[in-house]
Amino acid sequence: MNPLVDTTEPPFRFRQGSRPLLISMPHVGTHVPPALAARLSAEARQVPDTDWHLERLYDFADELGASVLVATHSRYVIDLNRPPDDQNLYPGQDTTGLCPVDTFDKAPLYAAGDAPGADEMAARREAIWQPYHRQLQTELARLKAAHGAALLWDAHSIRSVLPRFFEGRLPDLNLGSADGASCAPALADELLRIALQATGYSAVLNGRFKGGYITRQYGQPTQGVHAVQLEMTQCCYMHEAWPFDYRSDIAAGVRPHLLRLLEAALAFVERE
Protein backbone atom coordinates (compact mmCIF):
# COMPACT_ATOMS: atom_id res chain seq x y z
CA MET A 1 0.00 0.00 0.00
CA ASN A 2 1.24 3.47 -0.84
CA PRO A 3 2.39 5.07 2.46
CA LEU A 4 0.71 8.33 1.43
CA VAL A 5 -2.66 6.53 1.60
CA ASP A 6 -2.03 3.85 4.27
CA THR A 7 -5.43 2.19 4.07
CA THR A 8 -6.38 -1.47 4.23
CA GLU A 9 -10.06 -0.78 3.53
CA PRO A 10 -11.27 -1.70 0.01
CA PRO A 11 -12.29 1.34 -2.05
CA PHE A 12 -15.90 0.21 -2.51
CA ARG A 13 -18.55 -2.44 -1.92
CA PHE A 14 -20.49 -3.72 -4.91
CA ARG A 15 -23.54 -5.90 -5.44
CA GLN A 16 -24.58 -6.89 -8.95
CA GLY A 17 -28.26 -6.83 -9.85
CA SER A 18 -30.42 -8.22 -12.64
CA ARG A 19 -32.00 -5.10 -14.18
CA PRO A 20 -30.50 -2.11 -16.05
CA LEU A 21 -30.06 0.08 -12.96
CA LEU A 22 -26.87 1.01 -11.12
CA ILE A 23 -27.24 2.98 -7.89
CA SER A 24 -24.03 4.79 -6.98
CA MET A 25 -23.44 6.13 -3.44
CA PRO A 26 -20.12 8.00 -3.60
CA HIS A 27 -20.43 9.97 -0.35
CA VAL A 28 -21.65 7.39 2.18
CA GLY A 29 -18.18 6.24 3.20
CA THR A 30 -16.98 6.98 6.72
CA HIS A 31 -13.57 5.27 6.80
CA VAL A 32 -10.56 7.52 7.39
CA PRO A 33 -7.18 5.75 7.54
CA PRO A 34 -5.70 6.07 11.04
CA ALA A 35 -2.63 8.03 9.94
CA LEU A 36 -4.87 10.57 8.23
CA ALA A 37 -7.38 10.69 11.07
CA ALA A 38 -4.55 11.68 13.40
CA ARG A 39 -4.03 14.82 11.30
CA LEU A 40 -7.68 15.88 11.35
CA SER A 41 -9.51 18.10 13.79
CA ALA A 42 -11.83 16.53 16.37
CA GLU A 43 -14.84 17.77 14.36
CA ALA A 44 -13.50 16.37 11.10
CA ARG A 45 -12.99 12.94 12.64
CA GLN A 46 -16.78 12.80 13.09
CA VAL A 47 -17.05 13.11 9.26
CA PRO A 48 -20.16 15.33 9.54
CA ASP A 49 -20.53 15.89 5.77
CA THR A 50 -21.26 12.22 5.06
CA ASP A 51 -24.37 11.22 3.07
CA TRP A 52 -25.55 9.25 6.08
CA HIS A 53 -27.67 6.06 6.02
CA LEU A 54 -28.37 5.98 2.27
CA GLU A 55 -27.89 2.21 2.11
CA ARG A 56 -30.62 1.85 4.69
CA LEU A 57 -32.87 4.37 2.97
CA TYR A 58 -32.43 2.51 -0.34
CA ASP A 59 -32.61 -0.96 1.18
CA PHE A 60 -35.21 -1.96 -1.41
CA ALA A 61 -32.51 -1.79 -4.11
CA ASP A 62 -31.81 -5.52 -4.15
CA GLU A 63 -35.49 -6.40 -4.44
CA LEU A 64 -35.75 -3.88 -7.27
CA GLY A 65 -32.98 -5.74 -9.14
CA ALA A 66 -30.49 -2.88 -8.99
CA SER A 67 -26.73 -3.09 -8.91
CA VAL A 68 -25.36 -1.07 -6.00
CA LEU A 69 -21.94 0.59 -5.73
CA VAL A 70 -21.08 2.01 -2.31
CA ALA A 71 -18.05 4.06 -1.28
CA THR A 72 -16.17 3.02 1.85
CA HIS A 73 -13.88 6.00 2.46
CA SER A 74 -14.99 9.40 3.67
CA ARG A 75 -15.19 12.21 1.16
CA TYR A 76 -12.56 13.88 3.38
CA VAL A 77 -10.07 11.30 2.07
CA ILE A 78 -11.09 11.86 -1.56
CA ASP A 79 -14.32 13.01 -3.15
CA LEU A 80 -15.45 10.46 -5.71
CA ASN A 81 -17.89 12.93 -7.28
CA ARG A 82 -15.21 15.44 -8.29
CA PRO A 83 -13.17 15.47 -11.50
CA PRO A 84 -9.71 13.90 -11.21
CA ASP A 85 -8.16 17.26 -12.16
CA ASP A 86 -10.11 18.98 -9.34
CA GLN A 87 -11.92 21.46 -11.63
CA ASN A 88 -14.81 23.35 -10.04
CA LEU A 89 -18.07 21.91 -11.39
CA TYR A 90 -19.96 25.08 -10.42
CA PRO A 91 -17.84 27.98 -11.68
CA GLY A 92 -18.32 31.10 -9.62
CA GLN A 93 -19.81 29.18 -6.69
CA ASP A 94 -18.12 27.93 -3.56
CA THR A 95 -17.56 24.18 -3.37
CA THR A 96 -15.25 21.61 -1.83
CA GLY A 97 -12.50 19.94 -3.83
CA LEU A 98 -11.19 16.52 -4.77
CA CYS A 99 -9.29 16.27 -1.46
CA PRO A 100 -11.18 18.74 0.74
CA VAL A 101 -9.39 20.99 3.20
CA ASP A 102 -12.46 22.22 5.09
CA THR A 103 -15.92 21.12 6.17
CA PHE A 104 -19.19 22.35 4.67
CA ASP A 105 -19.17 24.92 7.47
CA LYS A 106 -15.69 26.10 6.40
CA ALA A 107 -13.95 24.69 9.46
CA PRO A 108 -10.40 23.50 8.62
CA LEU A 109 -10.05 19.72 8.36
CA TYR A 110 -6.35 19.61 9.18
CA ALA A 111 -5.59 20.58 12.76
CA ALA A 112 -1.96 21.52 12.00
CA GLY A 113 -2.67 22.86 8.52
CA ASP A 114 -0.81 19.98 6.83
CA ALA A 115 -3.21 19.58 3.92
CA PRO A 116 -2.27 16.98 1.28
CA GLY A 117 0.18 17.98 -1.40
CA ALA A 118 0.17 16.90 -5.05
CA ASP A 119 1.86 13.53 -4.41
CA GLU A 120 -0.55 12.58 -1.62
CA MET A 121 -3.57 13.62 -3.68
CA ALA A 122 -2.31 11.52 -6.60
CA ALA A 123 -1.84 8.51 -4.30
CA ARG A 124 -5.39 8.84 -2.94
CA ARG A 125 -6.72 9.16 -6.47
CA GLU A 126 -4.92 5.99 -7.57
CA ALA A 127 -5.89 3.94 -4.51
CA ILE A 128 -9.55 4.96 -4.09
CA TRP A 129 -10.93 7.24 -6.81
CA GLN A 130 -9.76 5.23 -9.82
CA PRO A 131 -11.04 1.80 -8.63
CA TYR A 132 -14.48 3.24 -7.87
CA HIS A 133 -14.73 4.78 -11.32
CA ARG A 134 -13.43 1.66 -13.04
CA GLN A 135 -16.22 -0.29 -11.36
CA LEU A 136 -18.76 2.32 -12.47
CA GLN A 137 -17.57 2.07 -16.05
CA THR A 138 -17.42 -1.72 -16.03
CA GLU A 139 -20.91 -2.17 -14.63
CA LEU A 140 -22.51 0.41 -16.92
CA ALA A 141 -20.91 -1.29 -19.91
CA ARG A 142 -22.20 -4.67 -18.70
CA LEU A 143 -25.73 -3.33 -18.19
CA LYS A 144 -25.75 -1.66 -21.60
CA ALA A 145 -24.53 -4.85 -23.28
CA ALA A 146 -27.03 -7.04 -21.44
CA HIS A 147 -30.10 -4.80 -21.67
CA GLY A 148 -29.49 -2.36 -24.51
CA ALA A 149 -29.75 0.62 -22.15
CA ALA A 150 -28.77 1.53 -18.60
CA LEU A 151 -29.69 3.96 -15.84
CA LEU A 152 -27.15 5.37 -13.41
CA TRP A 153 -28.78 6.80 -10.28
CA ASP A 154 -26.31 8.82 -8.24
CA ALA A 155 -27.69 8.93 -4.70
CA HIS A 156 -26.82 11.80 -2.35
CA SER A 157 -28.11 13.60 0.71
CA ILE A 158 -27.24 16.87 2.41
CA ARG A 159 -28.29 19.11 5.27
CA SER A 160 -31.35 21.16 4.39
CA VAL A 161 -29.73 24.45 5.43
CA LEU A 162 -26.13 25.14 4.38
CA PRO A 163 -25.41 28.85 3.90
CA ARG A 164 -22.05 28.14 2.27
CA PHE A 165 -23.71 26.58 -0.76
CA PHE A 166 -27.24 27.98 -1.00
CA GLU A 167 -29.57 30.53 0.55
CA GLY A 168 -32.45 29.52 2.78
CA ARG A 169 -33.71 25.96 2.87
CA LEU A 170 -32.95 23.53 0.07
CA PRO A 171 -35.85 21.76 -1.66
CA ASP A 172 -36.25 18.18 -0.43
CA LEU A 173 -35.82 16.35 -3.73
CA ASN A 174 -33.15 17.89 -5.95
CA LEU A 175 -33.01 16.10 -9.28
CA GLY A 176 -30.06 16.78 -11.57
CA SER A 177 -29.59 15.95 -15.23
CA ALA A 178 -26.72 18.34 -15.99
CA ASP A 179 -29.19 20.77 -17.53
CA GLY A 180 -30.56 18.03 -19.78
CA ALA A 181 -27.24 16.57 -20.93
CA SER A 182 -27.06 13.41 -18.81
CA CYS A 183 -30.43 11.78 -19.49
CA ALA A 184 -33.31 11.97 -21.94
CA PRO A 185 -35.43 15.09 -21.34
CA ALA A 186 -38.56 12.94 -21.25
CA LEU A 187 -37.10 10.92 -18.38
CA ALA A 188 -36.13 14.04 -16.42
CA ASP A 189 -39.59 15.52 -16.95
CA GLU A 190 -41.27 12.32 -15.75
CA LEU A 191 -39.11 12.19 -12.63
CA LEU A 192 -39.84 15.83 -11.82
CA ARG A 193 -43.57 15.22 -12.26
CA ILE A 194 -43.44 12.34 -9.78
CA ALA A 195 -41.34 14.32 -7.32
CA LEU A 196 -43.71 17.29 -7.45
CA GLN A 197 -46.61 14.97 -6.65
CA ALA A 198 -44.94 13.82 -3.43
CA THR A 199 -47.20 15.40 -0.83
CA GLY A 200 -45.27 17.16 1.90
CA TYR A 201 -42.02 17.39 -0.06
CA SER A 202 -40.63 20.09 -2.33
CA ALA A 203 -38.78 19.27 -5.55
CA VAL A 204 -36.74 20.89 -8.29
CA LEU A 205 -34.91 19.83 -11.45
CA ASN A 206 -31.45 21.27 -12.15
CA GLY A 207 -31.60 23.78 -9.32
CA ARG A 208 -28.58 24.34 -7.07
CA PHE A 209 -27.47 20.73 -7.64
CA LYS A 210 -27.43 19.82 -11.33
CA GLY A 211 -25.34 16.67 -10.91
CA GLY A 212 -21.69 16.24 -10.08
CA TYR A 213 -18.85 14.62 -11.98
CA ILE A 214 -20.40 11.15 -11.99
CA THR A 215 -23.69 12.28 -13.53
CA ARG A 216 -21.99 14.50 -16.08
CA GLN A 217 -19.26 12.04 -17.01
CA TYR A 218 -21.29 8.87 -17.47
CA GLY A 219 -24.65 10.07 -18.69
CA GLN A 220 -24.73 9.51 -22.47
CA PRO A 221 -28.42 9.41 -23.37
CA THR A 222 -27.80 9.22 -27.12
CA GLN A 223 -25.88 6.00 -26.40
CA GLY A 224 -28.62 4.61 -24.16
CA VAL A 225 -26.93 5.39 -20.83
CA HIS A 226 -28.98 7.78 -18.70
CA ALA A 227 -27.64 9.34 -15.50
CA VAL A 228 -29.62 11.17 -12.83
CA GLN A 229 -28.50 12.62 -9.51
CA LEU A 230 -30.84 12.90 -6.56
CA GLU A 231 -29.68 15.15 -3.74
CA MET A 232 -32.16 14.69 -0.89
CA THR A 233 -32.39 16.80 2.24
CA GLN A 234 -31.38 14.75 5.24
CA CYS A 235 -34.28 16.04 7.32
CA CYS A 236 -36.46 13.76 5.18
CA TYR A 237 -35.11 10.70 6.97
CA MET A 238 -32.63 11.49 9.78
CA HIS A 239 -31.38 13.93 12.39
CA GLU A 240 -29.18 16.48 10.66
CA ALA A 241 -27.02 17.08 13.76
CA TRP A 242 -24.64 14.81 15.67
CA PRO A 243 -24.95 11.87 16.18
CA PHE A 244 -26.85 11.86 12.85
CA ASP A 245 -29.37 9.19 13.80
CA TYR A 246 -31.63 7.53 11.24
CA ARG A 247 -35.33 8.30 11.80
CA SER A 248 -37.44 5.35 10.68
CA ASP A 249 -40.62 7.24 11.44
CA ILE A 250 -39.94 10.10 9.05
CA ALA A 251 -38.03 7.97 6.51
CA ALA A 252 -41.22 5.95 6.07
CA GLY A 253 -42.80 9.02 4.51
CA VAL A 254 -40.26 9.59 1.75
CA ARG A 255 -39.31 6.00 0.89
CA PRO A 256 -42.44 5.27 -1.22
CA HIS A 257 -41.72 8.35 -3.34
CA LEU A 258 -38.11 7.32 -3.74
CA LEU A 259 -39.15 3.86 -4.86
CA ARG A 260 -41.67 5.33 -7.30
CA LEU A 261 -38.96 7.51 -8.86
CA LEU A 262 -36.68 4.52 -9.38
CA GLU A 263 -39.47 2.32 -10.74
CA ALA A 264 -40.39 5.03 -13.25
CA ALA A 265 -36.78 5.48 -14.31
CA LEU A 266 -36.36 1.73 -14.72
CA ALA A 267 -39.52 1.48 -16.78
CA PHE A 268 -38.21 4.23 -19.06
CA VAL A 269 -34.87 2.54 -19.78
CA GLU A 270 -36.46 -0.89 -20.13
CA ARG A 271 -38.65 0.50 -22.92
CA GLU A 272 -35.60 1.63 -24.90
Image (cartoon, rainbow, N blue to C red):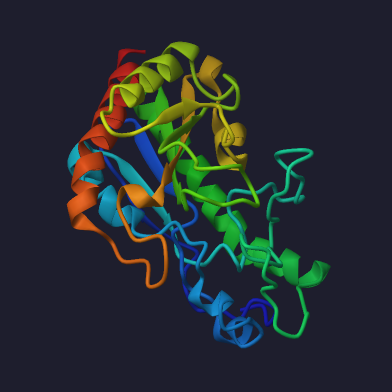
Q: Does the image show residue 129?
A: yes
Residue in front for this viewpoint, 179 or 1: 179
Q: Does the image show residue 148?
A: no
- Name the residue at 54% across, 28% down: 219
- Name the residue at 47% across, 53% down: 159
| Residue 253: image location, x then y, percent | 21, 42
Q: Which quarter of the figure has residue 113?
A: bottom right
Q: Which residue lies most toward the right here?
A: 118
| Residue 230: image location, x then y, percent | 44, 37
| Residue 259: image location, x then y, percent | 24, 35
Residue in front for this viewpoint, 85 or 93: 93
In the displayed structure image, the side of residue 59 where residue 52 appears, left or right: right
- Name the residue at 55% across, 25% down: 182
**Which quadrant of the rendered structure holds the C terminus?**
top left
Using the image, determine if residue 224 lies above or below residue 139. above
Using the image, determine if residue 224 lies above or below residue 133. above
Residue in front for this viewpoint, 272 or 169: 169
**Which quadrant of the rendered structure holds the N terminus?**
bottom right
Q: Which quarter of the figure has residue 99?
A: bottom right
| Residue 52: image location, x then y, percent | 39, 60
Residue in front for this viewpoint, 55 or 146: 55
- Name the residue at 20% across, 36% down: 256
User: Total number of numbered labels?
Assistant: 0
